[in-house]
Amino acid sequence: MAVAPERTRLTWDYSPAPESADHVRLRDAYGVFVGGEFADPRSGKSAPTVNPATEAKIAKVAIAGEEDVAHAVKVAREAQRKWAALPALERGKYLFRIARLMQERARELAIVETMDGGKPIRESRDIDIPLAAAHFFHYAGWADKIGYGIAGREHRPHGVVAQIVPWNFPLLMAAWKLAPALACGNAAILKPADTTPLTALLLAEICQEAELPPGVVSILPGNGATGAALVRAEGIDKVAFTGSTAVGKDIQAALAGRDVGLTLELGGKSANIIFEDASIDQAVEGIVQGIFFNQGHVCCAGSRLLVQESVAEQVEAKLWERMQKLRLGDPLDKNTDVGAVNSGEQLTRIETLVAAGEDEGATRRTVACDIPERGHWFAPTLFTDVSPVHRIAVEEIFGPVVSMLTFRTQAEAIEKANNSKYGLAAGIWTDKGGKAFEVAAQLQAGVVWQNTYNHFDPTAAFGGYKESGFGREGGAAGLRPYVRVS
Ligand code: NAD
Ligand code: MG
């Protein structure tokens, strides 16, 4: 008689699946990009940009100073007149070209984004880069239809616009800024973030390849001092800033009394609200997507989890189980869910706030992962027993840390969600469409997602309430900040 083979227990694991960076061709050093050419910075300063997963230096990058800013403004002013005088359809063609070149170089851009910033390749490949190209496609289409986008009013471009972006979505934020500015006939000077300048510099090469008229786009890499010089420069007509609320306030003060347009996209502490009638498994995926996407370095991250009391225990158990399946490690590995924290400085910020959460009496659980020896890492963390006054419920952590609170009624959910100085985004998980609309209408948040989270589209406007800023990016609404209407 044949004996049935003994069934062995299988432990399923992933083999490493690293994306090869072999074909990436970066220069050893990057200067400033002004007048369609790269040049050494007049400041004479530069600093290496580092891979936060390995702490390896990738390339030397200029730190533009005041003289670089002044020169870029002068060059942009000249270029802007000709750019605005082009038929709008022609401007649109350049944007289409840039979008197509971004698609052609998508793989390279994704790898460089991951190397420079630490985000998982799965995200840079499937989200950052395709969305950045989509923004250029979207505004390419608007270029000759701007009048329709702003209700037929008389309009003209501002002129020279200064644009400053943060490190969490480097190329995507650059695209959000540049595409509408150019479509509307402005010339733009973009300052990428200190730790992630590389994809903006590759975008400068793409502008060259697209034969964009020189001076229409300038890229000035640098630090906070570069940004401060740019917003104070003589001759700029508009500032668009994405970054922290503290710096946003500084910029607003610096521009007080000047006839310079301003839009601010700032921080957040967004509520992700789970009602008892939600599909719980789906909601748990949404919570994970809401807070662990891009290591939680997301302005609209669902960092305040509000769960209806009747399902709180169930949600907490399922969430913790799901969190333990997240894979932290090499951002270039295609199976990685949680990559490296963007910088040592950001890691310290996360650690400080997490320590405050413990000190104030919340219960902390952090997933036990193998943390790589080099680089900056923080494992996915869940806080329960959180009170609305705890720092971890009030301040933006900007890391893979979720603070769970509970509520009993719909009214209490709305009150708790709005109990924040911020108002960037919110999520609502419910089976009832009517309830979702009713709640959404009462939330002070620029974006409200229903039964999804962190979902972006170039046709949808994005922006804040309260200390999350003002002005909208994306869609027809994103044209308005880039024109003056009479
Ligand atoms: P940050 O404010 O420190 O820096 C943002 C940019 O501003 C960088 O390029 C930096 O060099 C520059 N900068 C710094 N000091 C400056 C100054 N005094 N004047 C002019 N420019 C200056 O922010 P960060 O830590 O790089 O980014 C994280 C912050 O950005 C978070 O608060 C996050 O919520 C926010 N953010 C908001 C959005 C949004 O759309 N609302 C999107 C992404 C990030
Ligand atoms: Mg870097």
Image (tube, grey):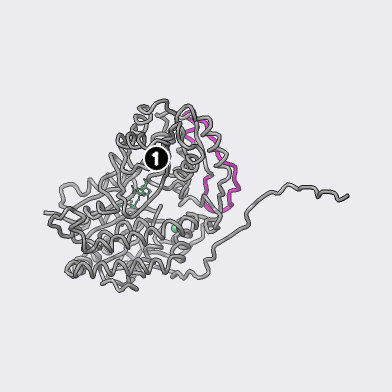
The amino acid type found where label 1 is placed reads Gly
Determine the image quadrant of residue 84: bottom left
> In the image, which residues are magenta?
355-378
Q: Position of residue 478 (x, y in %)?
A: 26, 53
User: Relative to 315, is 166 on the left or the right?
Assistant: left
Depicted 320 relative to depicted 65: above or below: above
Q: Nearer the viewer, residue 313 or 128?
A: 313
Residue 449 is left or right of residue 260, and the answer is right
Label 1: how many residues lie within 10 Å, few (<14), some (14-19) or many (20+)? Answer: many
Indicate the secondary structure of the residue bearing disc 1: strand
> Which corner quadrant holds the C terminus?
bottom left
Where is residue 471 shown, x and y percent of the image?
Answer: 25, 48
Residue 232: image quadrant is bottom left
Which residue is situated farthest in the left direction here? 486
Q: Disc 1 marks which residue?
A: 427
Q: Is residue 332 above or below residue 422?
A: below
- Residue 232, compared with residue 320, is above or below; it is below
Residue 234 makes an appearance in the image = no
Q: Residue furthest top?
A: 408
The answer to whether residue 291 shows anywhere in this view is yes
Chief secondary structure of the magenta span?
A: loop
Up the image or down, 381 lies above or below 32; here it is: above
Find residue 264 and report its horizontal and vertical position in percent: 27, 48
Taking 340 as reference, is 212 left or right? Answer: left
What residue is shown at x 45% (from left), y 62% (from top)? 110
What percent of the width, then of the height, locates residue 427?
39, 40
| Residue at (22% x, 45% y) in the render | 253
Residues 282 and 402: in front is: 282
Query: 408 or 365, which is in the foreground?
Result: 408
